[in-house]
Amino acid sequence: MTANTPHPPGRKKHGRLTAVMAVFLICLPACLPRSAPAAPAEFPDRELVIGTKQAPPFAIKGPDGAWTGLSIDLWQQVAGKLGVKYRLVEEPSVQSLLDATKRGDYDVSVAAITITAERERNVDFSQPFYDTGLGIAVSVQSISVWHEIIRTMTSLGFLQAVGALIGISLAVGALIWLFEHRHNEDFGGGAARGLGASIWWSAEAMTQASTGHRGPKTLAGRMLAIIWMVVSIITIAVFTASVTSALTTRQIRGLVNGVEDLPRVRVGAVAGSATTGYLDGERIRHRDFDKVQDGFRALASGSIDAFVYDKPLLAWTAAQEFAGSVKVLDTVFEPQNHGMAMPAGSRYRKAIDVAILEAIHDDAWKETLFRYLGEKK
């Protein structure tokens, strides 16, 4: 068949049919009705029960019973994105909140809940929405001078230094007796009497007390005496300067300046919080309180030296209620993440995760952080 030969009629019909079917298949998706968003369909047609606990600035209950705060505002944004209705139920503590969530009493729990391995074993957590860490609160009252003197004089370093001075003084006294007891009646008269007199002379020389009524007469004894007097003057001067500097520094800077000071002071924490787990792991003894406010009152009264808890909560409570008596140090340690808790295997987790990620990358979230924490991110 040549190029000019016409196609059979059947082949023309088949080609037209193929073209029509191709156009139909291309246009079919546009003609079908669009399905509803997947996330709202995952939630039941009922009011969700949301657990919470007062933990300013994350969850704040007003006098009228209305809830605000960093976590509450974020949940409101999430609920708006998902189109769900909810009601808030208050719990007295974080532990009771997590226990109720584990039982399934709450669909979601929203408060100042830090994500830990132990908690993850019992409940599911959403994507973290705020990164922070532990902070330290201390009293703004000046430290008692006598309190610091006693603390310094009973410290291990101080006792070691005193022991070294006494040991050297005893050794010098013994050498003086060895050199002088046969040639100098001041250090003679038997071992007990001679050693006692030699050691007493060594102590007098070390403290620059008067030794004019007696002293070594042999060449070796006098050479040792000269060396000991010079060395003891320098040693006492350095020792005195070190103690004075330590006391002055503590008076200016305070007793606690960072996490490295916690093992040596009286520490407080909120009972049942993630903070106690950290302190126990670091073998730091601590006194537990039911609320941050109780710990701050103990700080102000001098019952404890430092209070450890989530830094945002410390800063908020100090600024709102204890501005004149408690301050929060700049240090941050033991990084922590805050999230929303759900019963294990929750079918809402995926939708909530997506909504949280969308919310925290919005400009409204930056304004929320600044409003409650004064932070710009």
Image: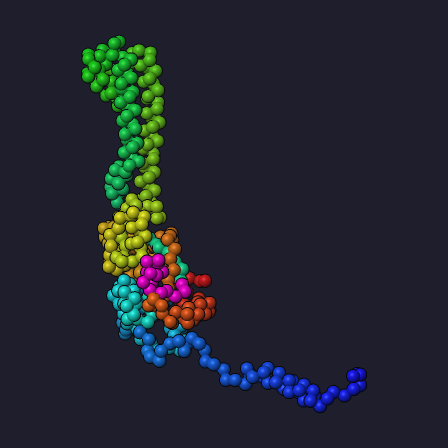
Quarter holding the N terminus?
Answer: bottom right
Is 32 drawn above or below residue 290 in the view shown? below
> What's the colour scheme?
rainbow
Q: Who's the residue at 29% across and 58% down the image?
A: 273
Q: Who's the residue at 24% across and 52% down the image?
A: 287
> x, y percentage for residue 85?
35, 78
Q: Is residue 99 visible?
A: yes
Taking depth in this image into account, of 27 and 360 the one nearest to the observer is 27
- Is 292 colored magenta in this rendering? no
- Is 113 colored magenta in this rendering? yes
Q: Is residue 249 left or right of residue 186?
A: right
Quarter holding the C terminus?
Answer: bottom left
Count the marks.
0
> x, y percentage for residue 289?
24, 57
Is 321 drawn above or below residue 153 in the view shown? below
Q: Which residues are magenta?
A: 112-128
Which image quadrant is residue 13 in?
bottom right
> x, y percentage for residue 4?
80, 85
> x, y percentage for residue 175?
29, 17
Q: Is residue 207 visible?
A: no
Q: Who's the residue at 24% across and 20% down the image?
A: 199
Q: Which residue is the extreme one toward the front?
A: 1
Is 374 drawn above or below residue 28 in the view shown? above
Taking depth in this image into account, of 357 and 70 the one nearest to the observer is 357
Q: Who's the residue at 34% across and 28% down the image?
A: 235
Which image quadrant is residue 337 in?
bottom left
Taking depth in this image into account, of 128 and 256 the one nearest to the observer is 128
Q: Which residue is the extreme one toward the bottom?
A: 9
Taking depth in this image into account, of 125 and 329 the one nearest to the observer is 125
